[in-house]
Image (cartoon, rainbow, N blue to C red):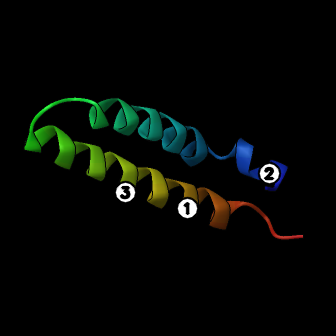
Amino acid sequence: MKKDIFKHPSFYIAIASFFIGFFFIFQEGSYMRLNSYLWQLNFIFNLNIARKAAPKK
């Protein structure tokens, strides 16, 4: 992983989304499970945004 990715705010939003989604996995109910999947998708999208924003060498 490039070190420039750590300078982008979307990387830190992605990390927070991952842990929030991980928390919701262990909650009961279909709404919580759906919420977990949405947070995990948010993690993937934000990580992709941060990766694309990092300058290529």
Please report whichever mark, 1 or 2, sits nearer to the chain's N-terminal start: 2
Query: For the residues carrying marks 2 and 3, which lies nearer the camera in this image?
Result: 3
> What is the C-alpha distance between the residues marked 1 and 2?
13 Å
Residue toward you, 7 or 23 = 23
Label 2 environment density (alpha carbons within 10 Å; few <14, some 14–19, many ≥20): few
Label 1 environment density (alpha carbons within 10 Å; few <14, some 14–19, many ≥20): some
Query: For the residues carrying marks 1 and 3, which lies nearer the camera in this image?
Result: 3
> What is the C-alpha distance between the residues marked 2 and 3?
22 Å
Amino acid type shown at disc 1: Ile
Please name the residue that numbered disc 2 is placed on. 4
Question: Which residue is rendered at x = 65% and y = 47% of the image?
Answer: 8
* Label drawn at residue 23: none
Residue toward you, 21 or 45 = 21
Question: Which residue is rendered at x = 9% and y = 37% of the image?
Answer: 29
Residue 45 rendering spot, x and y as whole percentages: 45, 60
Secondary element at tag 3: helix
Secondary element at tag 1: helix
Residue 6 rendering spot, x and y as whole percentages: 72, 43
* Label drawn at residue 49: 1
Secondary element at tag 2: helix
Label 3 environment density (alpha carbons within 10 Å; few <14, some 14–19, many ≥20): some
- Answer with the quarter of the image where residue 20 lies: top left
Amino acid type shown at disc 2: Asp
> What is the C-alpha distance between the residues marked 1 and 3?
12 Å
Please name the residue that numbered disc 3 is placed on. 41
Residue toward you, 21 or 8 = 21
In the visual, does 42 lie left or right of 10?
left
Question: Which residue is rendered at x = 56% and y = 55% of the image?
Answer: 47
Amino acid type shown at disc 3: Leu
Q: Reply above or below: 32 against 40.
A: above
Residue 26 rendering spot, x and y as whole percentages: 28, 31
